[in-house]
Image: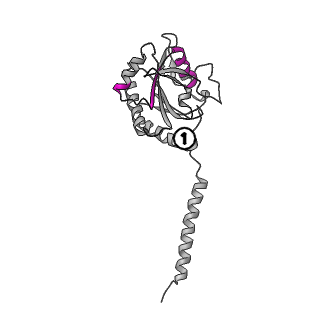
Amino acid sequence: MKLFRKRDFITVGFITVFGAVSITLFYFILTPEKTLPIYQPYEVNEKLVDSSISYISKYHKISDFKLINQNGKTITQEYYKNKIYVADFFFTTCQSICPIMTKNMLEIQEQLKNDKEILLLSHTVTPEIDSVQQLKKYALENNIDDNKWNLVTGDKRQIYDLARKSYLAVEDSEFGDFDMIHTENFMLIDKQRQIRGFYDGTDKKEIERLLLDIEILKNLN
């Protein structure tokens, strides 16, 4: 004796499919969209923030800038208009964390080499040493893609202000005017020039997190 008629199978199949679709829809409705914070100066380690802006709790953005890259080209904020980019601070003669940071930034370059929406920007903290020629030598030695990644030098006061008043990324130094103690931080900057993340540029797992956050940010923009 048949326990189920053909019509019963159709009904069970419909209920199963309907249930699966409903569960999927509820999952997407109830699961919050992945997003990223927008960092403000008051939230960041006070050692990395100039005291003149440490109280700011909203509307913080990267300031306008005018620097020179490894090819002697003037680079301003317009170069990064409508782009997502990763920024850091380094110097070419550094023998401690900088080589690791450069290696990890190279990994980001290679992972995203065909993505024209993403760029990289490294500022020297010793512009008196890191001339255009020195930056070019460093770029060639490290296989840096000029179309993807700018190494920039320029006025020391401007770089100091960018580091401590815009990117919130370096400690002050007492050794000389506008001297800086750079950190391992990579900063993720969105198309509105806002800081969306800080990452340890010497940590592989942090680089993986940065790459994932870039994808999240691309979906938000």
Residue 131 x, y percent position in the rendering:
42, 16
Q: Is residue 178 above or below residue 28?
A: above
What residue is rendered at 41% in x and 39% in y?
111
Tag 1: amino acid: Leu
**In this figure, which residue is indicated by the disc labeled 1?**
217
Name the side, left or right, on which 51 lies relative to 96: right
What segment carries the magenta color? Answer: 139-167
> Residue 192 is drawn in which quadrant?
top right
Residue 217 x, y percent position in the rendering:
54, 40
Magenta region includes residue 206? no
What residue is rendered at 48% in x and 42% in y?
212
162 and 35: which is toward the camera: 162
Q: Is residue 204 above or below residue 76?
A: below
201 and 116: which is toward the camera: 116
What residue is rendered at 34% in x and 25% in y?
141
The residue furthest bottom is 1
